[in-house]
Image (tube, rainbow, N blue to C red):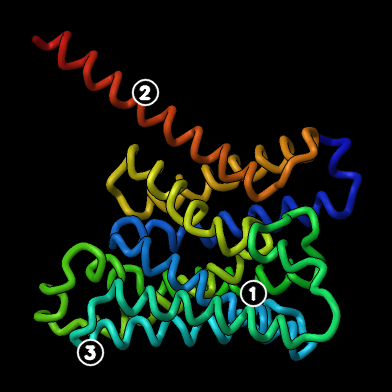
Amino acid sequence: MIELLQYEFMRNAIFAGMLASIACGIIGVYVVVKKIVFISGGIAHASFGGIGIGYFLGINPIFGVLPFSLFSALTMGTISKRSDVPEDTIIGILWSLGMAIGIIFIGWTPGYAPDLMTYLFGNILTVPGSDIYLMLALDVIIIGTVYLLYKEFMALCYDEEFSRVSGVPTEKLYLLLLCLIALTVVVMIRVVGLILVIALLTIPAALSRQYTSNMKVMMYLSILFGTVFTITGLILSYYFDIASGATIIIVMATAYLLNTVLQKWKMSSESISES
């Protein structure tokens, strides 16, 4: 491990993994508890349009993803709350529309987009220092917002109807939560890419939920799990020369499945001993 830290790209990769784990550990808990995994995936894939526009304009694609993902989140949330159109239909339309816009703008861009795949499937080993500062700033925004509105978000996730009757502005909070998901997607693009973003957003949070129902503890555990799994996947991908984003997801999924089997085995063992 010490040997790996002598390389700047590896230090950047570890910082990026930790920053992504913080964002996912906090927002992923809301996604899992509120059961909005599908809309999170829709925001992530619609953001591909921002990558295409960023390439076309000749700027860092992440700066194209940031406004595009926020726009997608607000559009999905507003239409699903204020129209009779089913939420999954809106997600499917914006998901495919964002991908189509991205492909068209990339096609209009002169030359070849050499690192496009790093935005689709992620490559944590290529994260530049400038992106680290951007990820850090987005993490600060996410932490600050959740710290100020923790109780309101908890009420929204556990009983939205009662919160609305009690005078809580649930629609505004819901749109704000979707915007935080959009910011988290931007943070994770370099780590696992748009295609695998759902896994990093849900697996650490789902794993932490198997140990506690306290939302704050879930967030701390989720951050810890995400950091450990990301660094483990990073080390394995380095030594075995395989795709980093995919390796991180496989490590997470394997840990989740093993823990689920272990929990089931413990429950069955306890029920047998009681009988």
Left or right: 116 as drawn, with respect to 20: right
> Where 261 sits versus 170, above or below?
above
Q: Position of residue 157 (x, y in %)?
A: 25, 65
How many discs mark residues in the rendered view? Answer: 3
Going 27% across and 82% down the picture, which residue do you hit? 80
| Disc 2: which residue | 262
Discs 2/3, front = 3
Q: Position of residue 206 (x, y in %)?
A: 38, 46
Q: Toward which corner of the image does residue 250 lie, by quadrant?
A: top right
At numbered mark 2, what does the secondary structure look like: helix, strand or loop? helix
The amino acid type of the residue labelled 2 equals Leu
Residue 180 seen in the current view: no
- Ranked by sequence position, the earlier of labels 3 and 1 is 3
Q: In front here: 80 or 274?
A: 80
Q: Which residue is mark 3?
A: 82
The answer to whether residue 118 is above or below residue 179 is above
- Which residue is the site of mark 1? 137
Return the disc, 2 or 3, that comes first in the chain's sequence.
Answer: 3
| Nearer to us: label 1 or label 2 | 2
Q: Say what secondary structure mark 3 lies in.
A: helix
